[in-house]
Amino acid sequence: MSNVKPLFGRFSGAPPISLPRILLILLLIVLAWTSYYTIPAESEGIVLRFGKYILKVPPGLHFKLPFGIDNVIEVPTQRQLKLEFGLVTPGYTHPDQVGKEPEKEKSMVTGDLNAALVEWVVQYRITEPETYLFAVRNPGLTLRDLSESVMREVVGDRTVDEIITIGRQEIEESVLDRLRELAGRYRLGVSVNQVQLKNVNPPEPVQPSFNEVNRAQQDRENAINLANGEYNKAVPRARGEADQKIRAAEGYRFKRINEAEGDAAAFSAVLEQYIKAPEITRARLYLETLGDVLPEAKQSIIVDESVQQILPMLPLPARLPEEK
């Protein structure tokens, strides 16, 4: 027994280490280990002392009271979070991102009592981490319930055709405005940035019928567009032709009016001269008329009472045509 060394005795010439010294070393290690913490760049830290909120710290290295006196909760305030309804994205990390029953979440009834499968995503960011943690119990689940309630309310006020075709953007804007209002009223500490409809479809048993209706509506729209195109081509062309004919008629009208006014002025001038000298004017008109008519005649024969024979008055050609 004399050769057996004590548990904390000498070893290789080192001084003996007592149990209190070991406990002190362990205490110092735990003290150093629990006296600092690091907040990631995309988060903020909420410091609790004995479970009570005392301050909010930015990203970086910080110190706290050890041994669990101070606890720190990391809140991702700089990360864009999202909630998915009716669909599941593989590899998600946020626990509130996907609901427990996606198939029931997307099943809705429209305002015209038709069924529709609506899938949507809500994107938000935590702006007040202390309010997010302590104002409402389970704020992520509360925001999910609010989003689903607001979407069902908005969808319930519209027809299935509006939801599937032309009303998607209006629905997104209405849900976003209403959700922002409720998030502020319930003090969730979040800022809702976007509501996006992913897929809006009728239930599977009636999808073929809806597809046929959509194709018929598209064909109808195409036919209307083609008809409008032909209308836009034909009507301006017809209007142009009508304007052209109207302008031609107006030009002809002005021409005839001017000609008539000129003829009337000329007749008035002749009448004035005729009144002054009727015989001279009559003879002049007669001679001027013959001057205009005779050149158009092919052959002229003038017979007077003193002429006994007509032959001397007939002009003979200078040279008779040769017979072949």
Image (tube, rainbow, N blue to C red):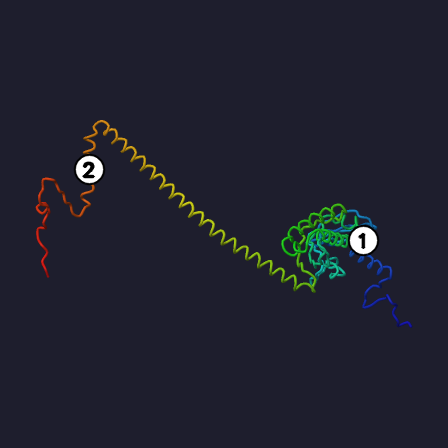
Q: Residue furthest right?
A: 1
- Tell me the kind of residue under disc 1: Pro
Q: Are marks 2 and 1 in contact (CB under 8 Å)?
A: no
- Tell me the kind of residue under disc 2: Glu
Position of residue 109 measured from the top left corner of the image (x, y, whole percent): 73, 56
Q: Nearer the viewer, residue 26 or 226?
A: 226
For discs 2 and 1, the disc positioned in front in the rendered view: 2
Tell me if 221 is positioned left or right of 50 in this view: left
Position of residue 279 measured from the top left corner of the image (x, y, whole percent): 19, 30
Q: Which of 273 and 23 is in front in this view?
A: 273
Q: How crowded is mark 1: few (under 14 residues within 10 Å), some or many (20 or more)?
A: some
Q: Residue furthest top?
A: 276
Position of residue 110 measured from the top left corner of the image (x, y, whole percent): 71, 55
Residue 185 visible, this angle: yes
| Among the 4 quarters of the image, the one containing residue 324 | bottom left
| Element on which disc 2 rests | helix
| Among the 4 quarters of the image, the one containing residue 91 | bottom right
Q: In this view, does 288 lie above or below 4?
A: above
Q: What residue is shown with label 1?
A: 66
Q: Which of 218 and 176 is in front in this view?
A: 218
Q: What residue is shown with label 2?
A: 288
Q: In this view, does 277 lie above or below 27?
A: above
- The quarter of the rendered structure image containing the N terminus is bottom right
